Structures are given as structure tokens and as C-alpha cells.
Image: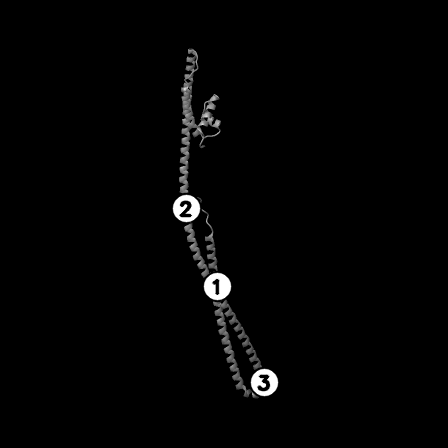
Amino acid sequence: MAVGVPETDVFAAADAVLARGERPTVERVRLELGRGSPARVGGLLDIWWARLAERLSGETRLPALPAEVSQAFVQVWQQAIHLASGVAELSLSDQRQVVAAERERVAEVEEQARRESATFRQRAAEAADARQSAETRLADLELLLEHRQLQIEDLVQQRATLVSERDSAQQQGLTLQEQLQNAQIKAEREREAQEIYARGVEERAHREVDRAREENKGVLAQLKSANRQLEQVQRRLAAIQVELSQAEQKAAAQQARGDTLERQLSQKQQNAAAKRKPRAKKPV
């Protein structure tokens, strides 16, 4: 609503409308002014109508005229005053209806504003509750995530330890396998040497039967010693094979445990990544 429209401007505009032979109304006066709210102009227009009636009633001075003309002029003037009063009353009734309608509209706007304000306050409270719940949930998820992270780090450390143990077992197995191969090569060489030696002894025995008979006991002793050495080598080879088999079984068990921990670690990382994804915000 425009504030500060002078009443003199409203009165002048109403006089101008009346001078054109039109009944001053709120819209016509506002159109004549080019500004002003209906409530402001309507209130000042009520004052203008009241003052117009006073102005018309106060005009009693007449020029010097014949008695008949003067009487007729007074009658016409009184009739004009009466008509002007009726018009003023009609205008006041219209203005009262306009003001009442404007008041009802303002009351409806105020009521709508109060309802909207209450709705906004309720939505703000709901949003605050939702935010508090979301922050609490986020804090719980962060704690859970930290716990999961500690578990993951522990599993990673365990996996590293198992991998180290597996590598050590594999290295030990390789060492034992190498020792077994060396023992097999050595035994094979000793066996070949014994065969060569036996063949030489046999050949010499054919040539020197007599001497061979004399040396038979010595040869037999050497053969027994060689057999004992061969048996010792074979027993050592068997023991090495048993150790190698045990080492391979231990390495296989370590490998299976390491694979199981890797799968568990991968599953926990996937679960943690899924929980870290942002949830869709609840509409406010």
C-alpha cells in the first residue's frame, strides 16, 4: 500500500472527477491521481463526501434576485443538496463494501501466511530431526568403518605373516629338494663307483683266481662296508624324502590358509566400500 498520498491531492482529484460530471469512486479517483491504494483513497474519499455535504449545506448566500426567482433557486439548490447527499451515501456504502472486502482479503492473506508459517516451522523441525538422525547414523557408520578398517589391517598383517611363512616353507622345501637331489646324485655316483669297482674286482678275479681267493675275505668286507654305506645313503635319502613331503604338505596348508584370508579380506573390503556409499537424502 502506498503511504503518504496527501488528502489534498485526493480531494482535488475527486473535485476534478465531479467537475467532469462523473460520480467520484475509488477507481476513478485513483485513475485521476495515477497512484494510491484502494484503502487509502477510499478512506480519504469518505472524508471528501462528508465535507462536500457540509460545503453544499453551507452555501446559503444568494445574490439580490426577485423573490420568485430567489425562492425557485433555493428550492433547486435544496434539491441538489438532497441529491448530492444521496449520491454521497451511495458512494460511502460502496466504499464501505470495498474496505470490508479489502479487510477480508487481508485477513485471508494473514491466515494463509500463518498456516504457511506453521507448515514451514513443522517442516523445519522435521528436517532438524532428520538431520540429527542422519548425523547419528553417520557417526555410527564412521565408528563401524573404523572398526572394519582395524580388522582389515589386522587381516592384512596376518596375511603378510602367512605369506612370509609360506615363502620360508617353500624356500625350505627347495633346500630339502636340492639336498635330496644332491644325495641322489652322490648315491648314484657311489653306486656306479661300486659297480666299476666290482667289475674290476671280478675281472681281476678271473685273472688272479688264486690271489682273489686269498683276498676274498677283504673284498667281501669291503663289499659289506660299501653295502652298509649304500644302506645308510638310502636311509638318509628316505628321511630326506619324508622331510620334503612334510614340508610340501605344510606349504600347501599355508597356501590354502593364505588364499582363505585373501578371500575374507576381499569380501570385507567390498562390504566396507558398499557401506561408504552415500544414501539418497530424505525429501523434506
Residue 81's image quarter? top left
Three-letter amino acid code of the residue under disc 2:
Ala
The residues bearing labels 2 and 3 have C-alpha atoms spaced at a distance of: 111 Å
Position of residue 125 relative to residue 45, above or below, is: below
Q: Secondary structure at mark 2?
A: helix
Three-letter amino acid code of the residue under disc 3:
Arg
Tell me the residue at 53%/86% (across/down).
Answer: 218
Three-letter amino acid code of the residue under disc 1:
Ala
Tell me the residue at 43%/54% (across/down).
Answer: 142
Front in this rendered view, residue 240 or 131: 131
Q: Are marks 2 and 3 in contact (CB under 8 Å)?
A: no
Q: Earlier in the sequence, mark 2 or mark 3?
A: 2
Q: Earlier in the sequence, mark 1 or mark 2?
A: 2
Q: Secondary structure at mark 1?
A: helix
Horizontally, residue 137 falls left or right of residue 195, namely left
Which quadrant holds the C terminus?
A: top left
Q: Position of residue 23 (x, y in %)?
A: 45, 22
Whether residue 153 is visible, yes or no, is yes
Front in this rendered view, residue 190 or 134: 134
Q: Which mark is residue 128?
A: 2
Tell me the residue at 51%/82% (across/down).
Answer: 225
Q: Position of residue 84 (x, y in %)?
A: 42, 20
> Residue at label 3?
204
Q: Position of residue 192 (x, y in %)?
A: 56, 78
The residues bearing labels 1 and 3 have C-alpha atoms spaced at a distance of: 65 Å
> Residue at label 1?
160
Horizontally, residue 59 falls left or right of residue 219, namely left
Tell me the residue at 50%/75% (across/down).
Answer: 236
Q: Position of residue 199 (x, y in %)?
A: 58, 81
